[in-house]
Image: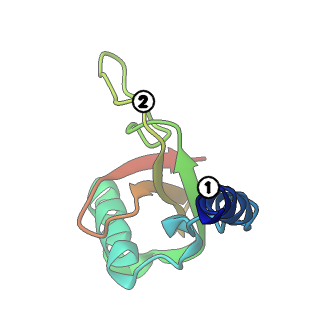
Amino acid sequence: MTKPRLPALLLALGLLAACQPVQPPSPSTEQPAPAALLQAALQLAAAEQNLAPNLLRVLSVEPVQWPDTALGCPQPGMLYAAVITPGYRIVLAGPDTTYTVHTDSDPEGTKIFCVQE
């Protein structure tokens, strides 16, 4: 009689395990943007606009799940991988306007400069 109990016990344990709540992994975008990433965004915007980096200040940093590797700024004629890409939208204040830098989540990774009027 012990053999019929073993499959029933295994089935019961399997069902109990399936009923346990599953914690989704915390997306990397919920973490604050690394200081190196913010510094790289400031340097990129300063270089693109021919400004001294000290003339720019960070207004906001928003975690974003970009729909593809274009990071929200597709360029005509370019192809992009259609994968969810975690990153940030960093808004910077300059002397006369605001600038937006779109990034992935890697401080050494992709940064795309976008001017926001």
Q: Label 2: state its secondary structure.
A: loop
Residue 54 pos. (x, y %): 37, 82
Q: Tell me which corner region of the image, top left, top right, bottom left or bottom right, holds residue 74.
A: top left
Farthest front residue?
Answer: 1
Q: Is residue 96 left or right of residue 20?
A: left
Categorize mark 1 by other alpha carbons within 10 Å: few (<14), some (14-19), many (20+): few
| Mark nearer the viewer, 1 or 2 | 1
Q: Which mark is residue 7?
A: 1
Q: Is residue 9 above or below residue 116?
A: below
Q: Is residue 40 above or below residue 48?
A: below
Q: Is residue 4 above or below residue 83?
A: below
Q: CA distance from mark 1 to mark 2?
A: 45 Å
Q: Which amino acid lies under the numbered mark 1 shown in the image of this protein?
A: Pro
Q: Which residue is mark 2?
A: 82
Which one is earlier in the sequence, the residue at label 1 or at label 2? 1
Residue visible at 48% across and 42% down in the picture: 84
